[in-house]
Image: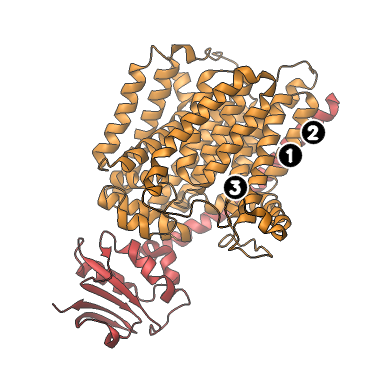
Amino acid sequence: VSVRALVGLALFNLFILGVGTSVLALSLGWRSARQIVAGSGLGYMVGVALLGVALSIELVIGVPFSFATIALTGVAFVLVAAALRPRVRRWRPAPPPETGTPGAGLVAVAFGALIVVYLEALFRAGRLAGLSAWDAWAFWVPKAKAIYFFGGLDEQFFRELANPTYPPLVPTLEASAFHFMGSADVVTLHVQFWFFACGFVAAVGGLLAPRVPALLIWPFVLLMLVAPRVVGRSLDPQADFLLDYFFALAALLVALWLLEREPWLLATASIFMGAALLAKRDGQLLVACVVVAALVGSVRQWRYAWPRLALAAAVAIAMAIPWRVWFTSRDLTGELPSAGVLALLDYPDRGWPALESVLTATFDYDLWLVVVPLFAVAVVLAFLAGARVLSAYALTLYVLALAGFTWVLWSFIELEVPLTQDEGVNPIVRLSGSLVVASAAIVPLLLDAAWRHANDSSSHV
Amino acid sequence: MVRVVRAGVVACVVVAIALGVVYLVRAVDELGDQASANATANYDDREFGGGNSLVVDKRALYEARALIPPEGRYRVVPGPNVVGATELTEPYIDQFARSFLMPRRPSPDAEWILCYGCDPAQLEVPTEVVWDGGGGISIHRTLS
């Protein structure tokens, strides 16, 4: 723990911000400072996703991992975005209005102040936090240290550490943070996850502010942030919350694409889907839920939407293929639940307890307050108001995710019935966090659609 | 229907604001407590983190870092003879050392041996004791 480490970490995150925002600004033709500032949260998270994916792939193909590798990779993204600038001109969205954006104003300032108070407290708690989370010290951070010390995916450590098939995006970003900090400082590393949390909040705010009134955005973002589980675990240096951020942003961008048909929204969503696939194996399930929900939500315009969704999914899957080749070529196993994909019928007695465990965790007030119940109400309201596309997409997404979580517990036969809710044993608490985090992004959109279209059943939404 | 929908939206916002503000106060309180607890912990406690629940004598791992060169190889031989061991010590000390001692590599035929509750007499190769912290924890080096 040192000032140098903190300064290094701040520089690393400025670098990420610069890379991601430059890529977006060059691709989308942002010109005004206002556009760049409003889009900087999304730009930061795009930078996290792009660098995480690219550095992971570089590790897999054997590029030596060093400070220079990180820097050159970021610079390469900016140069490529600049070079492709004329070609992606047609992606560029219509510029947002210069004044009167519904997400600005006094409400935003007031809630912004509350969120700043929260984030400041979160920073203080994380700055000197010990590496206590079991998975963090047992394999997430050791993998990062192995990348940092050995400059690659060290065969011995990546084989011997727990969960060898877990994808390397998070350890890669952690190792990058070590390079900027100048040492494998596992204490200051918690602050990196504070930056991720800040970036996610700014990204959601930046995406929703031009579209949704502030009063419908910030209370739900704040509610998610102060949920006890988020307060207690969001800075653990492991993949769970970063995966949740990627999933939530992908889900939000796909929802916006279903409504607005701007190609850049889907293209950006595919980056986050690829990052989710490389963050944790649960990402496969969550990305599949996003894609299938989008197919359902766009069923009436399937000729237009489905090929584009298929392309976005294919791009995301392509990002994860090199890692899959790496671990399968080394006979590493553990990617699927122990009972296999289709062995559910051999264990019929596990179905109901699994579903019960999933619902108990997802709706647990002591973990998540009422975030998911509010989502359920918002879906009903949006549906009643006639916002069919959005409500169908959101409902399908959450139902599929809950069904998927149930499948995971059903197939995870080491966990004996009756299922304990202890998160040290049962992964469901971590899984359910994805829906909670996503709700902070999706609920404002649903409520806005419900409010605006309550009088207008002929709306296209 | 319009009224129902709009009332529903308002109710959702009211609930979110009310709970958000109440739990913000609690969260800031809790995070403040965590920050204070972290600040009062010493450097070792922070660095060991989860290892505090299984590492009995932190000096042994620090000594191992000092004695074993970064490119060196070691093995941990756990056993039941650690004074003050927790139920996690014997099964997980090897896993914790793997991360703590990196970039030193674990290896079954390593020159350095971290005896964490083992019986030194049972080691397969002749060794010299290079550090002994007592309580069943010692560091050995094989005699070539």
Q: Picture coordinates of residue B85 (x, y %)? A: 43, 80
Tag of residue A387: none
- First reached walking from the N terminus: tag 1 or tag 3: 1
Dot 2 corresponds to which residue? B8
Quarter of image, res A252: top right
**How would you rate the neighbour count of disc 3 (Cα within 10 Å): few for under 14, some for 14-19, many for 20 or more?**
many
Chain letter, red: B
* Left or right, A382 with reference to A281: right
Quarter of image, res A20: top left
Dot 1 corresponds to which residue? A376
- Observer-side mark, 1 or 2, equals 1
Chain A shade in the render:
orange
Residue positioned most to the bottom? B121
* Left or right, B50 with reference to A440: left
Type of amino acid under label 3: Gly
* Left or right, A193 with reference to B47: right
Dot 3 corresponds to which residue? A433
Type of amino acid under label 1: Ala
The quadrant the C terminus of chain A occupies is top right
**How would you rate the neighbour count of disc 2 (Cα within 10 Å): few for under 14, some for 14-19, many for 20 or more?**
some
Q: Picture coordinates of residue A319 (x, y %)? A: 42, 35
Q: Residue at x 46, y 24 (%)?
A: A37
Mark 1 falls within which chain? A
In this orientation, does residue A292 appear?
yes
The quadrant the N terminus of chain A occupies is bottom left
CA–CA distance between discs 2 and 3?
25 Å
Type of amino acid under label 2: Gly
